[in-house]
Image: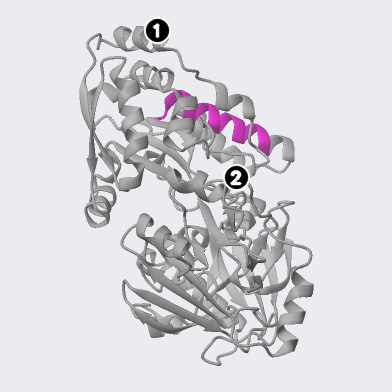
């Protein structure tokens, strides 16, 4: 697949040329088929990627090197358990309010409320206190039960919003410091972002971005094909080959796409409590065929939740299990299910149905009947967020980010990783504790490997493939790349029409 790199060396030169010539307004039109869910800066859910240009983070991570850098933080120093932070001066929110250390401290405190803090509630749970020491300086003290390096890595996830805008329940509450701000919204139909002329990092190349929401990915691609849209967000698998072959289209692959998996809790069927059954599933899945047929070759087989972006990824672990129907049949017979069994699988996205059918066909070969239930977003959310959320067999996706030594939202909710009874085995909890306390690179790597082995051996989760996330750009769109969190950096995009 022909792909754009994440950034281009020449972009800076193009940016200067466009900014200085006084050309007509640069408007990018982007087709999206999953509307954003809310204007909370601390929520990073499906669809909210389009809001990425509104807010910024305190820290960042260089994707190429893994080095932790500052974004809103001009400088920072780790002094024992305390992170001493100096903010950039002259940073203003879209409403003209200056960013100060007090706002950052208030932001941290607000995020302790899981209802408001959403995805940020875990990073701030590692903070004992945030003490303002000056207008632009503060000390962030980490709790003493985690290693400060680990806490620092997780803190890179922290977005800085405007606490005075809580509860972030309307478009006028989207007040950030980023390169774009909201101009207008037609809920479920259109969102318009315009350039922030007072952005502290300079000037964005685009004057406006118009996100149009479509009923499906197919209608979105029809609009892109006709030229109504400059960019199409998340090309459906079955159309990738067509656009890959079009010389007037560039496909840009997200560097950190989700990893798809089956979550098979014992409450989905009693058989899943049996480790031999779960191992039988691992051997029964023809991951190579699933990648080629279900994902049209734009994927790769997976068995662990770490990927090549992680320094702790061990390629050999992705080959622990292999396609072997005889072994799968032997294991499921030893488990006491020689004739198989029947269960229901919840699938949220209709476009994943063909992949689910391949899983269904593979499991049928060992006598297991898997009934696929496609549910809409509202029903799926109810099923997966109620108290028994983790007790539905489901087709899900996991997003890995390189700066997460432990996924921030779910480090101690061990049922997320699917351990029978919701209790992680000693091998896993011990490895987590070692990760948090590690002081050397060797100790950190060792703990991560042990965690991956524990998941492979004991978890009720079965990873099977990466899910490609690809954006289609007409060839006049240049300078598109993705940040650490897999979202577009629109401020350097150029239209060469």
Residue 362 part of the magenta segment: no
Residue 161 at x, y = what percent?
Answer: 50, 76
In which quadrant of the rendered image does the C terminus lie? Answer: bottom right
User: Looking at the rendered structure, which numbered label has been put on residue 40?
Assistant: none
Visual colour scheme: one colour
> Does residue 222 sit above or below 211 in this rendering?
above
Q: How many marks?
A: 2
Foreground of the two, 394 or 229: 229
Residue 259 at x, y = what percent?
Answer: 48, 41
In which quadrant of the rendered image does the N terminus lie? Answer: top right
Q: Pointer 1: what residue? A: 326
Horizontal arrangement in the rendering, residue 418 relative to residue 49 (left or right): left
Find the magenta span and give its range. Answer: 444-459
Q: Pointer 2: what residue? A: 436
**Magenta span: chief secondary structure:** helix
Q: Who comes first in sequence, dot 1 or dot 2?
A: 1
Point 45% across, 44% down: residue: 237
């Amino acid at each position: 697949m022909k792909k754009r790199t994440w950034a281009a060396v020449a972009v800076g030169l193009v940016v200067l040329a466009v900014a200085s010539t006084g050309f007509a307004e640069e408007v990018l039109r982007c087709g999206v088929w999953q509307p954003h869910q809310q204007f909370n800066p601390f929520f990073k859910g499906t669809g909210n990627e389009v809001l990425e240009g509104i807010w910024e983070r305190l820290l960042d991570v260089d994707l190429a090197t893994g080095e932790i850098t500052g974004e809103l933080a001009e400088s920072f120093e780790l002094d024992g358990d305390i992170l001493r932070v100096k903010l950039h001066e002259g940073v203003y929110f879209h409403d003209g309010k200056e960013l100060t250390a007090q706002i950052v401290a208030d932001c941290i405190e607000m995020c302790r409320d899981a209802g408001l803090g959403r995805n940020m509630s875990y990073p701030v749970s590692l903070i004992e206190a945030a003490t303002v020491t000056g207008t632009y300086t503060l000390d962030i003290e980490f709790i003493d039960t985690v290693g400060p390096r680990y806490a620092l890595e997780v803190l890179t996830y922290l977005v800085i919003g405007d606490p005075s805008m809580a509860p972030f329940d309307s478009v006028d509450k989207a007040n950030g410091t980023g390169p774009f701000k909201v101009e207008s919204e037609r809920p479920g139909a259109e969102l318009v972002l315009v350039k922030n002329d007072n952005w502290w990092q300079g000037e964005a190349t685009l004057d406006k971005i118009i996100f149009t929401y479509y009923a499906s990915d197919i209608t979105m691609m029809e609009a892109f094909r006709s030229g109504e849209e400059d960019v199409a967000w998340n090309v459906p698998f079955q159309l990738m080959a067509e656009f890959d072959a079009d010389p007037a289209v560039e496909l840009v692959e997200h560097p950190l796409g989700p990893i798809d998996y089956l979550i098979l809790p014992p409450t989905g069927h009693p058989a899943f409590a049996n480790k031999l059954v779960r191992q039988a599933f691992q051997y029964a899945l023809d991951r190579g065929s699933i990648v080629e047929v279900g994902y049209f070759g734009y994927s790769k087989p997976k068995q662990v939740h770490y990927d090549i972006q992680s320094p702790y990824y061990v390629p050999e672990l992705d080959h622990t299990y292999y396609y072997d129907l005889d072994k799968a049949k032997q294991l499921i017979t030893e488990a006491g299910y020689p004739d198989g069994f029947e269960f229901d699988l919840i699938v949220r996205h209709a476009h994943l149905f063909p992949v689910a059918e391949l899983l269904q066909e593979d499991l049928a070969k060992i006598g297991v009947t898997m009934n696929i239930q496609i549910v809409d977003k509202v029903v799926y959310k109810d099923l997966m967020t109620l108290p028994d959320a983790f007790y539905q067999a489901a087709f899900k996706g996991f997003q890995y980010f390189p700066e997460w030594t432990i996924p921030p939202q779910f480090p101690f909710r061990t049922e997320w990783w699917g351990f029978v009874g919701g209790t992680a085995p000693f091998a896993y909890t011990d490895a987590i504790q070692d990760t948090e306390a590690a002081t050397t690179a060797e100790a950190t790597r060792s703990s991560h490997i042990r965690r991956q082995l524990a998941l492979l051996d004991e978890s009720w989760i079965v990873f099977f493939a990466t899910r490609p996330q690809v954006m289609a750009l007409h060839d006049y769109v240049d300078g598109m790349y993705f940040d650490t969190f897999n979202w577009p950096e629109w401020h350097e995009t150029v239209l060469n029409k």
